[in-house]
Amino acid sequence: MIKKDKPDNVVFSNEHGYNAKLLPYPTSVGAPLIKTDDLAGWKNVGINKVNKEFESKFNELKMKYQDLIQEFQWNELVYNARFSFEPIVGEIYHLYKDADGSNFLSLIGPKEWIKEHVGTFKLDSDKKWILID
């Protein structure tokens, strides 16, 4: 049998001596209980919050993408239309469908004549057509 110099409740090591105050865990019976936290609930709340954030950002990007596609399609339609003048930045123009199915751009508003009106556009400084109506 090994003879101990100190009783079991005394924290002593031959290397470090009395080192109870240096240890990261309690060393006496009267020390407060160390209880591990249940992190499952915290993780679930965090996961749900982050997933909602990602979903929100994804939906926002999806909406921006759809807007960009629609803007591209309108610009393609106007730029492929027939017109015999140079459009001025900041002016408002009207796109019409001709009898043969082709599109043409005009300064004349839809209330001033009877043609199939496709849309009203404004040319911005980036040479991009913005749909107004």
Image (cartoon, rainbow, N blue to C red):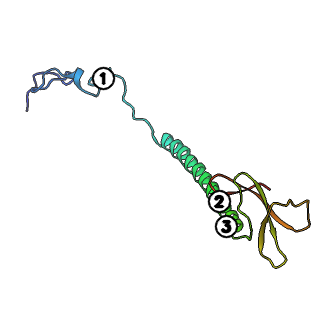
- Judge the density around disc 2: few (<14), some (14-19), many (≥20) Cα neighbours within 10 Å: few
In the rendered view, tell whether residue 67 sits above or below residue 114: above
Q: Amino acid at mark 1?
A: Val
| Residue bearing mark 2 | 66
Q: Residue at x 88, y 68 (%)?
A: 115
Number of numbered tags placed on the structure image: 3
Residue extending farthest front = 85
Q: Earlier in the sequence, mark 1 or mark 2?
A: 1
Alpha-carbon span between mark 3 and mark 2? 15 Å
Q: Nearer the viewer, mark 3 or mark 1?
A: 3
The C terminus: image quadrant: bottom right
Q: Residue at x 27, y 22 (%)?
A: 28
Alpha-carbon span between mark 1 and mark 2? 66 Å
- Judge the density around disc 1: few (<14), some (14-19), many (≥20) Cα neighbours within 10 Å: few
| Residue bearing mark 3 | 76
Q: Nearer the viewer, mark 1 or mark 2?
A: 2
Image position, residue 75 (x, y; %): 68, 63
Q: Residue at x 64, y 52 (%)?
A: 125
From the viewer's perspective, is 25 left or right of 104? left
- Judge the density around disc 3: few (<14), some (14-19), many (≥20) Cα neighbours within 10 Å: few
Quick one: SS at disc 2? helix
Q: Amino acid at mark 2?
A: Gln
Q: Nearer the viewer, residue 68 or 99?
A: 99
| Residue bearing mark 1 | 29
Alpha-carbon span between mark 3 and mark 1? 80 Å
The reply to whether discs 1 and 2 touch (Cβ–Cβ < 8 Å) is: no
In the rendered view, tell whether residue 80 sits above or below residue 34: below
Q: Earlier in the sequence, mark 3 or mark 2?
A: 2
Q: Nearer the viewer, residue 46 or 105?
A: 105
